[in-house]
Image: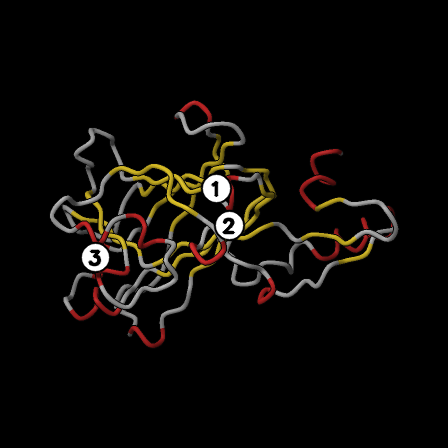
Amino acid sequence: MRDRCYFSSKLPVMFSLLLLFGIGLADAKEDDRSNLVSVENGGQLVESVGSLPDWPDEDWNGAIDGVWETWAETVTMFNSPQEGDDHPWAIFAFKDEAAQVIDAVSFFMITKAAIDEGSQTRSGKDFQILVSTSGTNETDFGLALEDTVDFDINTPFEDEEWVNFTFDAVRAKYVKLVFLSNYGDGTYTSLGELAVYGSLAVRPLGKASTTWGEIKSSR
């Protein structure tokens, strides 16, 4: 579900749960939520398909490096990967490959490089977010979100915002991003940056400790 405010739909439920369980709310500010897959925060690329051998600087690592100004800092992939898969995809892990409870992703799609070269139609459109708590085999993953990055591909670079999505909180050790389509380019799909955010957490009073994902899954 696309959402430009991560927390508004969950806060009433959260406050009810806080009264019920006697636990305190952590600072619920979007700015406080760190991108768990960014290299800066220990995130890492685990596996991928669709990268271009001729342009190694535009591989999937560009999705989590924290920059998206030039082609070398973004991702360009084949719509039909040479590895034989139907769509390009990448699997990311959090710091130390530890499990996290997540409920939001964001994309920065329209890059200055793409606009300068008139390549906005490469921008990823329909996508899936899959998660695994065990391994990285195809059968290990379950679908957390399937949606569309819906925006005006002709929006000037200076005005383009991150496109944000939320979903039901889920525990994950690995996050897999699959792009199913783009905005019309017949060969390549591109991405500026990917962000994955942890679920809104609650801070205990006393010794109790829990998270929104754990409360939800226990009901």
Pointers 2 and 3 in contact (C-beta within 8 Å): no
- Gap in Å between the C-alphas at discs 2 and 1? 8 Å
Q: Nearer the viewer, mark 2 or mark 1?
A: 1
* Secondary structure at numbered mark 1: strand
Residue 105: x and y in percent read 48, 52
Residue drawn at x 52%, y 63% is 4
Residue that protrudes farthest toward the bottom in the picture:
158
**In the rendered image, the vertical position of residue 82 relative to residue 45, given as above or below:** above
- Gap in Å between the C-alphas at discs 3 and 1? 23 Å
Res. 47 image quadrant: top left
* Secondary structure at numbered mark 2: loop
Q: Judge left or right: residue 115 versus residue 138.
A: left
Choose between 101 and 19: the one closer to the eye: 101
Residue drawn at x 51%, y 52% is 36
Residue that protrudes farthest toward the left in the picture:
54
Residue drawn at x 28%, y 58% is 74
Q: Which residue is mark 3?
A: 121
Pointers 3 and 1 in contact (C-beta within 8 Å): no
Pointers 2 and 1 in contact (C-beta within 8 Å): yes
Res. 121 image quadrant: bottom left
Q: Which residue is mark 1?
A: 145
Residue 113: x and y in percent read 21, 67
| Colouring of the image | secondary structure
* Secondary structure at numbered mark 3: helix
Return the mark for residue 124: none
The amino acid type, in three-letter code, at marker 3 is Thr
The amino acid type, in three-letter code, at marker 1 is Leu
Dot 1 crowding, Cα within 10 Å, few <14, some 14–19, many 20+: many
